[in-house]
Amino acid sequence: MTTDNPAPVDDLLAVPSPIPTPGSDPAPEQPRRVPLWRWTVGRLLTAGYLLAISGLLAVGVNSYVRIDTLLEARVPIERSHAVLSQISMLWQQIQDAERGQRGFLIGGDEQYLAPYSAAVLDLAETQTALGELTADDGYMRQLYEALGPVVADKLDELAQTIELRRSQGVDAAVELVSTGRGVRDMAAIEDILGNMRQHEQELLALNQQVVTDSGESTQELIALVTIGVGALAAIGAIWVTRKVTTPIRRVTEAARHVSRGDTAQRAAIGGPLELEQMAIAVNTSTEAMVVARDQAVAAGKAKAAFLATMSHEIRTPMNAVIGMTGLLLDTDLTVEQLELVRIVRDSGDALLAVINEILDYSKIEAGELELEDASFHITDVVDSALALVAVPAGDKELELIGYVDASCPPVLRGDVTRLRQIFLNLLGNAVKFTPRGEVAINVHAELLPGPDDKVLVRASVSDTGIGIPPEHIGRLFQSFSQVDASTTRRFGGTGLGLAISHRLAHAMGGDITVVSTPGIGSRFTVTAVLRVSPQTEQDREPGWTALTDKRALVVDDNDTNREVLRAQLADMGMRSTEVASGPEALALVRAGEVFDVALLDMLMPEMDGAELGAALRLLPDGERLPLMLLSSVTMPLTTEQRAMFEAVLTKPVRVSVLRTTLTRILGAIETTPESTKLPAPTPESGALRILVAEDNLVNQKVAQLMLTKLGYRADMVSNGREAVQAVRLRPYDVVLMDVRMPIMDGLEATQIIRGDLPEDRQPHIVAMTASVLVEDANACMAAGMDDYLAKPVRPTDLAAVLGKLTAQIPAARTEADPSATPPARPEMALDNRTAALHARLDELTGPNPSTEERDFMAHLLTSFAEKTGPALDALESALHAHDLNEVLTQSHTLKGSAANIGAPALADLLLSLEHQAREGTLPDPATALPPIRQELSLVIPAITGLVSTLTAKA
């Protein structure tokens, strides 16, 4: 077995050269040489440990020496204590001997001699011990030698008295005692022992002072050594720490700069070997990362450019495919051909939607997304988004609820298209993933600090759908990702919608967050920073006070709907009472509660809106109560049911439509009954010279038809500049001026007309706009307009305005004016079916639909026209086969579709057929189907015309 030769030490210490950058030629290996010995982190730490250990050893040795000295100084002290103890013991023993002798002399009993006998035996030992302890002290030795004879004489005296007492009696012993010999001996012994004690105490005090001084010096020395060693260790620790941490700090600071995007920052090379190598490695990695980042950015831009280019290249022929298939659908095709063309058209629409999403995504990825800055009404954005999801929501019988809080300014500035795109995506997802219940959008706003009038708009889209597991929420905003694969297969989609919406929200200074509980529902909250559009703050015009302090009865079983309607009515200046069922509403009316209008929901348990309306009409106080029905798009009404209501609005109800309808209904109540009728054309009516300024072709046609029905003829222009030029060339009595138009809007055109024309040529200018806000009305009046009509313009309202003006025109001018137009023929009435389709279009999208809304409605109408014929064939087959279930299914489906697009007469015929099927009786196909086919033959041309208008405008 062989092993590789170990590398030389110099090679091991060589610093590797930086790695070559991608795309560059690798440089030859030239390792940077370093000295054989230098500081490393290990050596620095070792030096620090050695310094600390040396200090500890110094402190330990010093302490050991000083403690040994203290122990030696205690020996004399202990000896002095022993001498003093022996002196005390000797004196005590002599006293015990004398006490025993006296007791025996007095009593004569031998037992009194016990102390004497014990003391005599111990005295010899005590004297010997005392002599040994004082042997090295000359003075004490002298005293000890003087003590011995005196003690011996005292003992002899005691022995003689004891013997005399035994042999001759007490008198002989007393005679010897009375000689004073014993007293002299005791005095001498006490004096000698006292001198010995005093001398030894002086020695003890001296030795104790020496020990005390030595202890204090030991403390001082240990403290000084400890402080010195500690200071030295601290200096060493600081030095070692700086040698290690300074290079680390430089490296981490460089890494922090790089993480913030400052790729020019590099780590300083220095310090211990390992840290120097780490700095070199960090710098090398940073350089490699910069190169890799640049390559990734370039690749991302190339990918985004490719996506954008390919999307545009595919979109161009795809538009041709969709356009041609649309034209092909208008030709005579067989059923099989119609189905094939429809499949091509639907596939093209689906592909175009995917391409649009990818194009948006590529713009965001490439950083080419530019946000618009224009004024818009936030309620219009919410209403249009709700309208576009109303059909799929109606198919599921979902409640769609929209509410804009009073905290949100009515007119904002920002990118309305992108904001609507976000709302529509969130609402579309909510409808898609909600099988039952409700979908609601609530918009609030708060003013941000600062001089720019910025507001943070917060819109919450909540649903009662399937919910999202917590572990999958993190994937929601990833591109091309959905919750899981099964969701993709079941619900479809590219997975880009939320990702695009999330990035759009970030671009507008906000974010999108989500809270969801599986099985209960989800709430997506989007925020965006917008600006408040300047508005006038003048008082409300007299014509706009019809709703103030009016009282409404709201009947709806949905708590959220009631709360939203209450807030909307309050914003209009109305008061409302809300109840959850028909019986509660009937109880209030029976109790004498007075209401100006009642808003009834169609779908309610126990008693629906139509049944409640019929019941109210039977009550004395409810017979003349104006009723409004809020119905789903899939709930058609019979002619009798429609006759009970002043208006039938489709949910979700646009705020502008609700306000306009309430204004029309409550304003009409205050006028005479005759004023509410559409006047018949009269010879005088044609005398008015009318100019209509409207950029929307559909609205031009609608205005032309209304005026024709009223007996007027008008000239049409498409913007404010053309209106100014027309008024300068020809005197007009009335100008119906749209407010929002390209090139020059209605407000600017009105100001120019008021400033340029003389007083005798000033026309009566009537504003026409989709907004019903007080601020817009005030702005129109401030610009010089004379009247205001809210879109959708009602024929009765238009007739009232023009009729008032007709009466003011001098007869002479009418007779002399060669331009006066003869009245139109009464039979030129607006086609009911086209009007119904337009009314439905206005309900879903408002009077000025966006491009997306027009595309949606065109697709909806085309789909109805394509599918209804085959569906009627299937219905006829089911009638011939007496298949009750199939007749129910086909009639119900066709009825909902007809009501959905705005064909109420066709829906009524199908509803009648459905009712017969539900009762178990099937009519004869020969009598039941011809009226339906006849009505369909009248609806299809109206649909074709409307689709042509929508697609031409798009």
Image (spheres, rainbow, N blue to C red):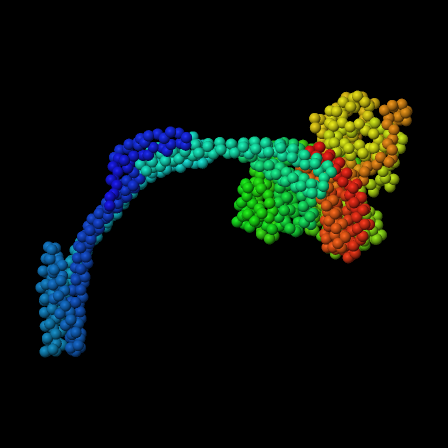
Q: Quadrant of residue 698?
A: top right
User: In the displayed structure, does residue 93 sit left or right of residue 332?
Assistant: left
Q: Quadrant of residue 162?
A: bottom left
* Residue 98: image location, x then y, percent: 16, 70
Residue depicted at 75% across the width and 33% down the height: 699
Closer to the camera in the image, 52 or 791: 791
Q: Is residue 856 above or below residue 714?
A: below
Q: Quadrant of residue 900?
A: top right
Q: Is residue 811 above or below residue 461?
A: above
* Residue 50: image location, x then y, percent: 26, 43
Closer to the camera in the image, 32 or 733: 32
User: In the displayed structure, does residue 380 sit left or right of residue 197?
Assistant: right
* Residue 646: image location, x then y, percent: 80, 45
Residue depicted at 65% across the width and 35% down the height: 321
Residue depicted at 78% across the width and 53% down the height: 915
Residue depicted at 35% across the width and 38% down the height: 245
Could you tell me which quadrant the N terminus lies in? top left
Closer to the camera in the image, 200 or 80: 80
Could you tell me which quadrant the C terminus lies in? top right
User: In the displayed structure, does residue 327 sit left or right of residue 506?
Assistant: right
* Residue 666: image location, x then y, percent: 80, 42
